[in-house]
Image: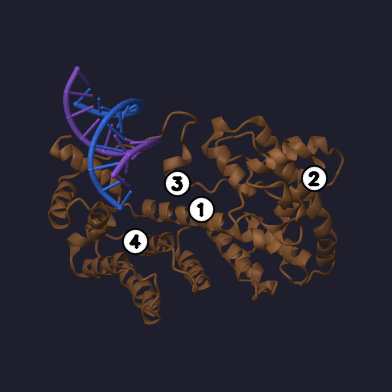
Chain colours: A brown, B blue, C purple
DNA sequence: TTAGGGGTAGCT
DNA sequence: AGCTACCCCTAA
């Protein structure tokens, strides 16, 4: 595969949302096995898509395991370990809908997930097997025998933690991946086209220097390693720091996308048309790049930000047939941030401390002192819904500030 | 990672 | 108004 094809593949793997094929399947179909970074992109893309649809299932565990293998040569990230642990628990918890452990498929799930799947991890001494995971394993196995334990776990809000940790992991992964080569090219192209002074100013803003703009060849592979703010990051900034983002920044983001669309249209269209005519099974043919004006009216699931470039750009490029590429949706699915108002801080609904939690906290302090992290780790079940800061604050209340 | 100051929201 | 839970920030 040539450089351009790989760029396109990379872009498609990263960008296609609501896909008809999994990014990982597409990756396999394209036979890109020697590109670990592309594979990471595909895995992270699939995980993001699952999360956007609220699917925290055993396929997610597969993806997390693949991700861990892909990062075998480096230290496994804490976020990956936590995400795996909580996802595994969540996958088990969904089989705890009956009143008692013996009904339903809890036993089977336990064997499948904790016996087989995690058993394999143990054999290959995976970093994913953390003390936290082992504690959960023993708790879950205990739940088979003890109805109290079963009930306790059954009523715990694991899903919230699983999603939070997955969200955190994905954020880190996308940041590590940086922006795609095509985006990089589009940005350079755009910056060159603009007034040079403005470009330099803009470049600074996005962590670019003037030299890098002119440096085409080297940036492709090396820049990717850097923490380049991608268009995703622009979106993220729009979401999280909306008030501070000026109109010029939003315009730049939009124009970048438009540039990208023009470039990719030229690159993708011929091969796609061919692919459709031949009806071959390369996988790329199933990626939707045909014009779909009706989709512009699709319902916006976010906070209704007027960020989507579909409407504005179509008028500026009137009469032109353009491929449909979805505007990236924000990855923040955490309930913490979902309804966050623009200015005032969002507060989670207040959950009063139960006597059990308070007792666990007292015991924890007795045992570990004010090591909130250890206290939480030592009792993940009771403190499932509490952060270390929560523990600290509660203790502050208990002893009277 | 933790401590602590200072603040807000929601409830009674 | 007072209390509790939670948030944000900074310093160590």
Q: CA distance from mark 1 to mark 2?
A: 30 Å
Q: Earlier in the sequence, mark 1 or mark 2?
A: 1
Under tag 2, what secondary structure? helix
Work out whether disc 3 and disc 2 sit on a shared chain: yes
Q: The N terminus of chain A lies in which quarter of the figure? A: bottom right
4 or 1: mark nearer the eye? 1
Residue with the mark numbered 4: A93
Residue with the mark numbered 3: A334
1 or 2: mark nearer the eye? 2
What residue is rendered at 19% in x and 70% in y? A145
Crowd rating for badge 1 (residues with CA inside 10 Å; few <14, some 14–19, many 20+): some
Q: Earlier in the sequence, mark 3 or mark 1?
A: 1
What residue is rendered at 56% in x and 46% in y? A330
**Residue A399 appears left or right of A36:** left
Q: Nearer the viewer, residue A324 or A35?
A: A35
Residue with the mark numbered 2: A192
Q: CA distance from mark 4 to mark 1?
A: 25 Å
Label 1 marks which chain's residue?
A
Crowd rating for badge 3 (residues with CA inside 10 Å; few <14, some 14–19, many 20+): some
Under tag 3, what secondary structure? loop
């Amino acid at each position: 595969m040539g450089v351009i094809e790989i760029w396109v593949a990379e872009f498609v793997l990263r960008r296609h949302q609501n896909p008809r094929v999994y990014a990982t399947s597409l990756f396999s179909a394209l036979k890109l096995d020697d590109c670990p970074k592309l594979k990471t992109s595909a895995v992270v893309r699939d995980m993001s898509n699952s999360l956007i649809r609220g699917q925290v299932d055993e396929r997610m565990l597969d993806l997390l395991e693949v991700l861990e293998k892909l990062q075998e040569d480096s230290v496994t990230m804490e976020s990956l370990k936590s995400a795996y642990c909580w996802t595994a628990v969540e996958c088990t918890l969904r089989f705890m809908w009956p009143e008692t452990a013996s009904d339903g498929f809890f036993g089977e799930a336990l064997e499948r997930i904790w016996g087989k799947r995690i058993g394999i991890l143990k054999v290959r001494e995976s970093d994913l097997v953390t003390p936290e995971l082992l504690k959960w394993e023993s708790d879950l196995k205990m739940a088979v025998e003890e109805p109290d334990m079963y009930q306790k776990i059954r009523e715990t809000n694991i899903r919230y933690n699983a999603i939070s940790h997955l969200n955190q992991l994905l954020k880190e992964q996308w940041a590590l991946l940086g922006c795609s080569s095509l985006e990089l090219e589009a940005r350079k192209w755009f910056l060159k086209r603009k007034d040079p002074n403005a470009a330099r100013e803009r470049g600074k803003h996005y962590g670019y220097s003037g030299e890098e703009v002119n440096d085409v060849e080297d940036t492709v592979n090396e820049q990717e390693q850097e923490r380049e703010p991608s268009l995703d990051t622009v979106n993220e900034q729009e979401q999280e720091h909306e008030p501070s983002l000026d109109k010029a920044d939003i315009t730049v983001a939009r124009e970048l996308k438009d540039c990208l669309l023009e470039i990719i249209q030229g690159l993708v269209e011929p091969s796609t048309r061919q692919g459709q005519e031949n009806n071959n099974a390369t996988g790329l043919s199933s990626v939707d790049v045909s014009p779909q004006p009706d989709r512009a009216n699709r319902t916006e699931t976010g906070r209704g930000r007027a960020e989507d470039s579909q409407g504005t750009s179509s008028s500026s490029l009137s009469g032109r047939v353009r491929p449909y590429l979805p505007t990236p949706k924000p990855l923040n699915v955490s309930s913490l941030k979902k309804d966050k108002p623009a200015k005032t801080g969002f507060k989670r609904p207040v959950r009063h401390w139960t006597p059990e939690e308070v007792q666990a906290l007292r015991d924890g302090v007795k045992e570990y002192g004010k090591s909130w992290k250890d206290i939480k780790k030592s009792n993940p079940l009771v403190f499932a819904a509490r952060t270390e800061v929560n523990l600290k604050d509660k203790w502050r209340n208990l002893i009277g500030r």
